[in-house]
Amino acid sequence: MSKSVAVIVAVALALLLAACKGGGGDTSNLKANIRFVHVSPDTDAVNIIYDSATVVTSLGYHGATPYQALDWGSKEVKVQSAATGATYSDATISPTFQGYYTYLLFGGGSSMSTLLMSDSVADADSGKFYLRAANVATGIGSVDIYLLSAGTTIDQVAPTFSSLAYGGTATFTQFTAGDYSLVVARAGSKDVIYDSGKQTAAAKAKVTLLVYATGSGKLVNGALLYSDTSGTTTFIDSSLARFKFVNAATDIGSVDVLVDGSVALANIPYGLLSAYNTLAAGNRNFKIQASSSPGAYVYNQNTTLATATDNSLVAYSVQGTGSAGLIALTDNNLPPVSGKVKLRLVNASSDTAAYDAYVNFSKLLSGLAQGTASAYQQLDPGTYTVTFTPAGTTTQAASLTLQLDVGHVYTVYTYGRVSSLAVATTTDY
């Protein structure tokens, strides 16, 4: 045997022995690659402790990290409020070495859930890309997802991913690379609740559409999670928003509401309200006119509706002017905690009086000012009497008895003037 051949054989034997050492090779220097995505609405920014070490600080809602090289095996992951230190989640995961993962934080408020998704998938065929979807949109239920080419609508095709349940993940599936829009509808319907607009899917891309909650009772937002070397995340906000209108404008009577110059709601009587209406998000012009006097606007201002939000627009009379004001509220229609209801109180009166609010004759709030809303209260389901008194007095100005059913979100409005105060309620979710 020549000297050079002997050296090659010796090196090969050494490498073989090293590979066999420990029953499969020494992988102590290999890592798992994990990206963290915070899509839990109404939840603080968080710190993440991985295997006793803080690996993420102050990650806010609608935020994501790139992939991080972390130790593999059975590991504890704690998610804590960056503001208070409260622990939202404490879970054990088992990533593998050289695996790629996304760790999702979702739910809402202090009720956070987590999900570890494997992002590893083989390369797509020539001219193809991989797509899957994950549904973590709290309170929305199951969804259908459509991958639409230009000129195609959801009415013309079957869903790409059908009835994807909350907390569920679809399988990576290959499609031809090109331009598409990603559209989400409630399962079994053609009721669009998200549209990404045109997106370009490159050949060999590996993409997850993440569907997540915003606080709307119907609309969702989306993000594209790329399984590339860095773990790119692109948030693509919805183009939609919702609003409902409450006519609490004393002295004006029935009203019409115009959005960007076109009548959106007609003949809403005093003391009544509309259902939620879906429209394009952004800066919109709202006009209010008495139904009996078209073109004579008692209100004419712009209001910005944030993407994928529910909004309550409450008209009240500006005393002594014959005009109206508008209270613009962003509704939080995340479901209440298990076994509870959510209740919000709004002072939409047409004078400057502040009110104390009583629930079953126990004071809940003091001095709720005109044009303001309370925080949402978590209550047990049941029958409640809600009473308003001028602040600092026990003189009843208005009262309402209502049934609050488990799992729902309600708003109670007081409106009118102190001498003729009235109360109305809506089920927002």
Image (cartoon, rainbow, N blue to C red):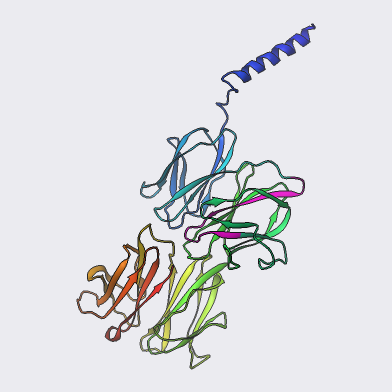
Q: Position of residue 333 (x, y in %)?
A: 44, 65
Would you say residue 290 sits in the magenta stretch? no
Q: Position of residue 42 (x, y in %)?
A: 43, 58
The span shown in magenta is 125-144
Would residue 276 be seen by someone viewing this image from the given angle?
yes
Say which of 172 and 243 sits in front: 172
Tag count in the figure? 0
In this picture, residue 62 sits left or right of residue 182: left
Looking at the image, which residue is at 40% across and 66% down?
408
Say which of 58 and 89 sits in front: 89
Q: Position of residue 142 (x, y in %)?
A: 54, 59
In the current view of this chain or complex, which residue is farthest to the right? 2
**Looking at the rendering, which quadrant does residue 363 occupy?**
bottom left
397 lies above or below 173: below
Image quarter of the C terminus? bottom left
Q: Where is residue 185 in the image (x, y as percent from the top left)?
A: 58, 64
Looking at the image, which residue is at 59% across and 60% down?
144
Looking at the image, which residue is at 39% across and 60% down?
336
225 lies above or below 428: above
Would you say residue 132 sits in the magenta stretch? yes
In this picture, residue 391 sits left or right of residue 406: left
325 lies above or below 114: below
358 lies above or below 420: above
In this picture, residue 129 sits left or right of residue 234: right
Image quarter of the N terminus? top right
Would residue 376 be seen by someone viewing this image from the given angle?
no
**Looking at the rendering, which quadrant does residue 90 occupy?**
top left
In the current view of this chain or complex, which residue is farthest to the left? 394
